[in-house]
Amino acid sequence: MARTYRALAALISYPTEALQAAAGEIALTLAEEGLIPAAERAAIDVLLIELTKRDVYDLQERYFALFDRSRTLSLHLFEHVHGESRDRGQAMADLIELYRTHGLEPTAGELPDFLPLFLEFLSLVPEDEARSLLAEPAGILQSLADRLTGRHSTYAAVFQSLATLANAPDAVVPAIEHDDPNDLVALDAAWEEAAVHFGPGEQVDTCGAERLGRRLRAATHAVTAA
């Protein structure tokens, strides 16, 4: 079990003063476990410096502009696979079941495909299994890394490190149409979504984990519409 995944989850979570205070511990964890190559850790260090030096409200505004106002940078994995189709509900039910089999219970109001939560889960399972699960959305991770690099965002370092950890060189990076986070009319239209329901009618069978893998790998062929 690797704490590296939990450290990376913290880095792409909503910035708070608690996160700023934990920056040193995050850097130490990444260095001690050595799962991430030195060059990529150096790029993450730049992000850590920003997180500790900049005003927390500025950090929160930047985070919102990147990940909440741009659908192509969504931190919800199945957004890149299913959009708001009915299939997303079943995929998330499968993911919840996978979490529960390893003792992780998502809190109310927390969507299971949120990448920081997924990484928290990976920190609870054996490393071989974690790498295998991370490889399934490798195309999404590389796409996010490329898009953030194009925006000159220091967050790109985290996603590039995740893509490296996934170790899936044959993963196809999905072609994603560019969206303008400042076009509020288009943003509102894109985020009109139906509620996702769990419970009766959303059955999870013994093949849930296998089906979940197929859904994540489907992202290698997905095209996300803005």
Image (cartoon, helix red, strand yellow):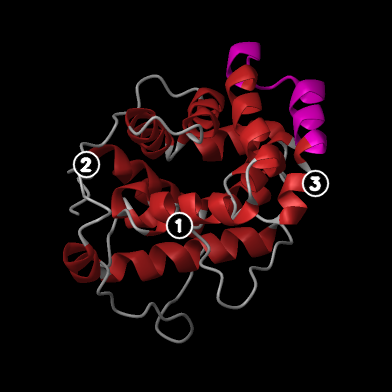
Looking at the rendered image, the quarter that the C terminus falls into is bottom left
Which residue is labeled 1 in the image?
64
Picture residue at 40% right of the left edge, 53% below the top: 65
Rendered image: mark on residue 176: 2
Q: How crowded is mark 2: few (under 14 residues within 10 Å), some or many (20 or more)?
A: some
Report whether 77 appears left or right of 122.
left
- Amino acid residing under circle 1: Phe
The earlier-in-sequence mark between 2 and 1 is 1
The earlier-in-sequence mark between 3 and 2 is 3
Decide: is 1 above or below 92.
Answer: above
- Amino acid residing under circle 3: Ala
Q: Residues within 10 Å of mark 1 (few under 14, many from 20)?
A: some
**Element marked by disc 2:** loop
Picture residue at 69% right of the left edge, 22% below the top: 35
The answer to whether the residues at label 2 and label 1 have Cβ atoms under 8 Å apart is: no
The answer to whether the residues at label 3 and label 2 have Cβ atoms under 8 Å apart is: no
**Element marked by disc 3:** helix
Picture residue at 49% right of the left edge, 84% below the top: 199
Q: Measured from the top left, where is residue 13 in percent x and y?
A: 60, 52
- Amino acid residing under circle 2: Ile
Q: Disc 2 and disc 1: Cα gap in Å? A: 20 Å
Which residue is labeled 3 in the image?
21
Closest to the observer: 136 or 189? 189
Q: What stretch is highlighted in magenta?
A: 24-40
Q: Main secondary structure of the magenta part?
A: helix
Q: Disc 3 and disc 2: Cα gap in Å? A: 35 Å
Picture residue at 68% right of the left edge, 56% below the top: 16
Task: Classify residue 131 by image quadrant.
Answer: top right
Q: How crowded is mark 3: few (under 14 residues within 10 Å), some or many (20 or more)?
A: few
Task: Classify residue 151 by image quadrant.
Answer: top left
